[in-house]
Amino acid sequence: MTARAGDPAGLPRDRKRVLLACLIAIPLAVLSGAQALSSTILRRAPDSALAVFPANGLAAEEVAYRRIAAAAVPAAGGTVASPDSAPRGEDLARLAASAVAPARAAIRREPLAARAFVLLALAEPDGARRRDILFSAARLTRRDPALQTLLLEEYGRSGDYAGTIGTLDAILRVDPDRRDVFFPALAKTLAEQPAAVPAFARLLAQPLPWREGFLAAAVIAPGAPDNLAAVRERITLNDREFDRKLIARLAADDRLDAAERLYAKVAGPQRDGAGQAWRADFPPFDWQLADQPGFRAQSGEQSGTLEIAVRPGNGGVIAAQVLRNPGAAFTVRLGHKVEPQSQTSDLRLKVACGGGGEPFFDRPFTGGASVFTVERPPACPFLTLSITARAWTGGREMRAELAPLEISAGAAAEPQ
């Protein structure tokens, strides 16, 4: 075969195409491999990742971020466990200023480099510009913990409760393991800021993946139940156990007005009048029944009665209920069967002001049926009706069945 003019290699056309393809493909393959290797080792060795592939914007971002975190350790006078725990304040702003150039380079290479925006925000002395940087970064990504932490600080500084709660929601959706860190902060905001109630209500009205966990934490958080009850009154929530705990916590904190409002909402129109049934769904406005070995009461579901069993050597309050004080004389009536009958007087009705204190009314049950008149209740907003029972050591076990308790206005003669 004769070589063509201008073809010094004298290669066939097909072989030239193959050679040209190799000359193009091999550098691309090397570049692709370098990029893949850089991405693989990014978190473990960002300096090496940047050396392998200098165009890796995320590596440039991580190098700058870790550089400032490492420099922050002596500034903090101790050991920093992670970049996210680096100190705040003037020292950190000064250190961040030294990383502005690599942070900007990282953003040019990778516009979604969230931590590069964090560095720029930390270094920015002007509050308005700092907010612009953070909010611009937040529009790009909501997944970086350092960015979310700065957003939390910014919202907290400006009193933006909706922003604070929304940012915490974003963090908890991405990183549920941070619940132990952020639930106390969220509960503290709810406890200390009544103005945050509408924002909490809007958020918790949604079926959030962390909602039940937060409610369980908030109901036992110091100072939170009052505002938590205000949130609960604004939303629909199908969680009877939470409602039961919140009502009980409010009552235990002597917040009976708030507890009664919540009870009216969750018990709804199906609730019975005070005292008229032995329902125990939401104590203390429904009955709180003893449930201990040798000392228990339970509602007889079919008969509507209260069944009591007390073994010898046991005694105390076996059933109690809180009701609003009528402010005038009222009468309590109930039928009962007690075995043995000789122990009927070991059942007693006591009445005290709601929230504790010594009973101002204390009478034993009488044979057949019992009628009790409370003539002059003291001026307290709520009353606690208690039924006590005792089976004496060396005696017989008490078994009793109480008919539904009836409460009516006015006085009636007590049996003598």
Image (cartoon, helix red, strand yellow):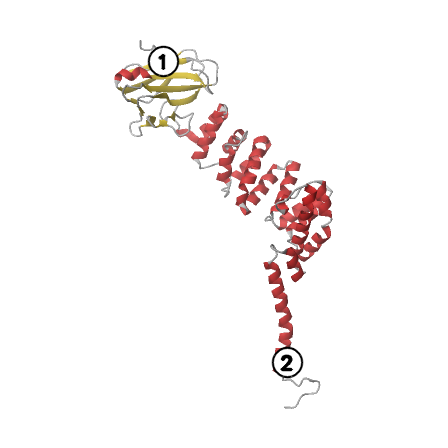
Q: Which mark is residue 88?
A: none
Look at the picture and state if 270 lies above or below 72.
Answer: above
Helix, strand, or loop for circle 2?
A: helix
Cα separation, mark 1 vs mark 2, equals 112 Å
In front of the other: 73 or 386: 73
- The quadrant holding residue 321 is top left
Q: Which residue is mark 1?
A: 363
- The amino acid type, in three-letter code, at marker 1 is Arg
Q: Nearer the viewer, residue 269 or 401?
A: 401
Residue at horizontal 62 percent and vertical 60 percent from the top: 38
Q: Is residue 78 above or below residue 357?
A: below
Residue 198 position within the rendered picture, expressed as x and y whole percent measured from the top left: 56, 34
Q: Which residue is label 2 attached to?
A: 16
Quarter that holds the N terminus: bottom right
Q: Which of the marked residues, 1 or 2, is nearer the chain's N terminus? A: 2
Q: What residue is at 61 percent from the left and 50 percent from the top?
A: 141
Among all residues in the image, which is located at the extreme top? 416
Q: Position of residue 361 (x, y in %)?
A: 40, 13
Q: Which amino acid is tagged 2?
A: Lys
User: Can residue 258 be seen by looking at this rendering?
Assistant: yes
